[in-house]
Image (cartoon, rainbow, N blue to C red):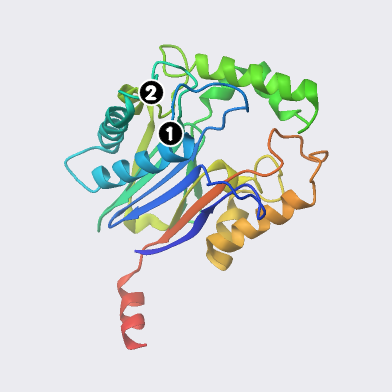
Amino acid sequence: MAVEAAPAGTASREDPRLSEDVVCIEPGCVAVLDGASVPEGIGTGCCHGTAWYTRQLAAHAAALAQNPRFGLDEALGRAIGAVRAAHDSTCDLDNPMSPSATVALARWNSECLQWLVLADALVLVERTDDTIEVVQDLRDDALTPELSARARRHTPGDARDEARWRDHTVAQRAARNRPGGSWIARSEPEAAGHALTGSVDLRRVRSFAVMSDGAARLVTPFALTDWNGLAHTLREEGPAGLLEQVRTAEGTDGDAARWPRVKRHDDAAVVHCAPVRPRERARRRDH
């Protein structure tokens, strides 16, 4: 498997903070996590922070996913439990604002590609028959459509819009990880059982990508390309080239007038993988 990643980047080139997106690559598996941002001034009950949480969870999830005895949902559930145990004694993990993250996992062997998606991180599979499958969990939008629509009309820096975003975030977090709500990796291991999972014969896969939603902005919300176009960019320019295009697009709309959104820039992470066929392996050996 040929694996190429762009380092998980912060929301802009000038942003000095630690990215809340993280990539973890282990033999036979990839994890991409996107930490859920919290508006300034809202307490989370955790002394560690979202960036710490995403790094801990990604490391545990990728390590456990290497074990073929675990389904990806079980591996993620065990990872959530391990991170909970690491800060349960110091933090209020019953606070719905406690650190959380969207998760995309991919695992492969010589025969099969498996994936798991929880919340709006995504897996894109480019098949050998030229079709594209995009796996993304958008239950948050379906459960709070009015709040989500308001967020999409957001103008960064506008006091009323910032207040609406705070209200949206509080309402959204309160509806998560409970019966009838949406699900995200937080402190409840059972959330992993609500993830979207699937698999495909590896012989039918030309390439696949595991990414945070910030890396997919060229498709949504910017609509500058479609999923086929995004897959083409990854093939031709790699993950770094894709993220460069995202940053360029964000920079042309610094006031979020063309594409209303909560964040002018968003953290982004992407890993692109392509199976190496026997003929290609032989060609690489010859060179």
Q: State the residue in front, 139 or 23.
A: 23
Picture layout, residue 49 above or below residue 202:
above
Residue that appears at 50% across and 14% down: 175
Element type at mark 2 = loop
Q: Amino acid at mark 1?
A: His
Alpha-carbon neighbours of circle 1 within 10 Å: few (<14), some, or many (≥20)?
some
- Quarter containing the C terminus: bottom left
Of callouts 2 and 1, the N-terminal one: 1
Left-right relation of 199 to 265:
left
Residue that appears at 75% across and 29% down: 154
Q: Which residue in the structure is indicated by mark 2?
A: 91
Residue that appears at 36% across and 76% down: 280
**Horizontal and vertical percent for residue 167?**
65, 16
Left-right relation of 251 to 239:
right
Left-right relation of 287 to 40:
left
Element type at mark 1 = loop
Label of residue 48 in the image: 1
Alpha-carbon neighbours of circle 2 within 10 Å: few (<14), some, or many (≥20)?
some
Residue that appears at 52% across and 32% down: 36
**Horizontal and vertical percent for residue 162?**
73, 25
Label of residue 204 in the image: none
**Horizontal and vertical percent for residue 74?**
25, 33
Q: Quadrant of residue 248?
A: bottom right
Cβ atoms at labels 2 and 1 below 8 Å apart? yes
In the image, farthest residue toward the top: 179
- Quarter containing the N terminus: bottom left
State how far apart marks 2 and 1 are (Cα). Answer: 8 Å
**Horizontal and vertical percent for residue 51?**
47, 40
